[in-house]
Amino acid sequence: MLLLAVKAISEANRAFLAAHEIDVVTPDTVTAEQIPEIAISYGWDNRIGEKILAQPHAKLKWIQAQSAGVDYLPLATLKARGINVTNASGLKAEPIAQTVLSYILYFARGLNVYATRQHWEPFTDQYMISELPVLVFGTGRIGQQIAAQIKGFGGTVYGVNTTGRAVPGFDAVYPIGNYQEGLAKARVVVDGLPGTSDTANFFDEYFFEQVNELFLFVNIGRGTTLDQQALLAAIDDTRVRFAALDVTTPEPLPLQHPLFERPQILLTQHTSWGEHANFGRTGGLFRLFEKNVPGFVADGQLTHNVVDLDKGY
Amino acid sequence: MLLLAVKAISEANRAFLAAHEIDVVTPDTVTAEQIPEIAISYGWDNRIGEKILAQPHAKLKWIQAQSAGVDYLPLATLKARGINVTNASGLKAEPIAQTVLSYILYFARGLNVYATRQHWEPFTDQYMISELPVLVFGTGRIGQQIAAQIKGFGGTVYGVNTTGRAVPGFDAVYPIGNYQEGLAKARVVVDGLPGTSDTANFFDEYFFEQVNELFLFVNIGRGTTLDQQALLAAIDDTRVRFAALDVTTPEPLPLQHPLFERPQILLTQHTSWGEHANFGRTGGLFRLFEKNVPGFVADGQLTHNVVDLDKGY
């Protein structure tokens, strides 16, 4: 079976493919004879993709997209040709969830005090994760990964999604129209909302007026979902004790922006997706891809991250 | 059944005891008639303890000590009288393990960079927990709790103990005479050794000479187990990239001590045991105690943290 590696594949991962009798060609080395033989496209390159689809008997059956959204693919053509697509949804869920846990533990265990303290003055009002119930707005891959990590520490985690449908791993899920029920129980709020017209400035003055003693507000969703002035006001009158923001408006923030100047606010500058080995925004793609390899090789089945070609996601 | 609350018991915990038909008296309110009726001493008070043991028909059957070591108790007498002792070993294992995870995530997710950065300059060389195998010296309650948390993040964790006997939750355990096998695989070392004559300055110049690219050295054991000059030398020539120390020699550290002056070193000033609700060094004792209550009430059995009265621990 032949695979076109549009995205680079490491030696170790090539060994995994070889063990499944999958040969690898790259856009630089692929020959005209090999084009119709390609069964898997790992990543998508429009130029070579068109050449493949121009072959009436092309063996292509699986495209692993390098992105969560796949609207740039010729979905109708792919459906007509019986070619399946898997996307990269959740690619960075694990590192982002680890960053969220790092935020919570940073403030909960008092590291914010000790990071800069250069004299001996113990601070002992730490919290356990179990003492800080978390409410996550957004119950997709990232939200679920956060929930799993919180539960691993014996904590409590609530979710908010559109309809309030239950999602495994959350102690309870509330519909976005009634998030207040979850908010009343939470000491940590995680904004993991996608950036749509519905979510613009969702966390605004009205939201923060409902908050009394929030320990920590986290934004790992989109900068546009948060009214930063409203957050600053809530920080300044102590309704919110701490904030950790991975995303902001604008990016980069200018020097002397008020978000830089509050010691209660930690800014990680849109790097929560970072990993050492899987460097870059699509690093770790193989980790998602490989889950489907055994099933695909055995009988052509794909079970993880499969795109509905009619819906486009 | 009567319980003497030498250590304070909260309203919620008193309700738990009431549900098991256990009445509570305190050293201030206990009457001479009640002394021989006391079946459980929650904590130990020498003065009242002597009065109880002076009664030939005292019903005392269980002492919950407020400490890990119990050498201050009259162990031979207790054994002769059929009185069992449970200790407080592992009392702070959960908060200490959470602090250890906070250290690892702090450096792994780049928070050490962002804690003080007041301009926009993304740092993206983060690590996942799975990229930083951990070697824990000490496989008791605290070590096991650390191991469980590391595994919860999909990480790898090795242990070191006296004999190399396997301990659940560790991927492998090495004897202290051959810790090098574990060290070769580790990027994080956690010093959780007790303070004995054998462990004094265990982590010395010789130890750090064997280290090449250690990501993080953690001490949550005893300050005396670490030669701090040897650690500073290893930090300064980059064999060790970061260190997080909860315990030091001396405590408190004087102003301008070199440990305060290295930005690569985080000092949490012997506070890793902190919790918000269970404030103080014996806070959380009831959490250990309550595990034994149902069994004791049912048939006098104690199964958690039971002291061997011959060995004394």
Image: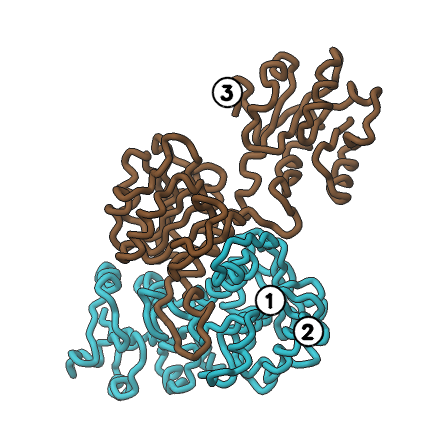
Chain colours: A cyan, B brown
Residue at 72 percent of width and 67 percent of height = A181
**Residue B248 vs residue A165, the one in the foreground:** B248
Residue at 41 percent of width and 31 percent of height = B196
* Helix, strand or loop for disc 3: loop
Asked if marks 3 and 1 fall on the same chain, the answer is: no
Asked if marks 2 and 3 fall on the same chain, the answer is: no
| Mark 2 Cα-neighbour bin, 10 Å: few <14, some 14–19, many ≥20 | few
User: Marks 2 and 3, Cα distance to the nearest angstrom?
Assistant: 57 Å
| Mark 3 Cα-neighbour bin, 10 Å: few <14, some 14–19, many ≥20 | few
**Residue B246 vs residue A95, the one in the foreground:** B246
> Residue A135 appears at what percent x and percent y?
62, 66
> Residue B203 appears at what percent x and percent y?
33, 42
In the picture, measured across the screen, residue A67 lies left or right of residue A18, that is right
> Residue B123 appears at what percent x and percent y?
38, 72
- Which amino acid does the dot numbered 1 rest on? Leu
Asked if marks 2 and 1 fall on the same chain, the answer is: yes
Find disc 3 in the rendering and name its residue.
B311
Query: Mark 2 belongs to which subunit?
Result: A
- Which amino acid does the dot numbered 3 rest on? Lys
Find disc 1 in the rendering and name its residue.
A216
Furthest residue toward front: B255
* Helix, strand or loop for disc 1: strand
In the picture, measured across the screen, residue A25 lies left or right of residue A257, that is left
Q: Return the disc, 2 or 1, that comes first in the chain's sequence.
A: 1
Find disc 2 in the rendering and name its residue.
A237
Residue at 50 percent of width and 47 percent of height = B252
Q: Quadrant of residue B26?
A: top right
- Which amino acid does the dot numbered 2 rest on? Asp
Query: Mark 1 belongs to which subunit?
Result: A
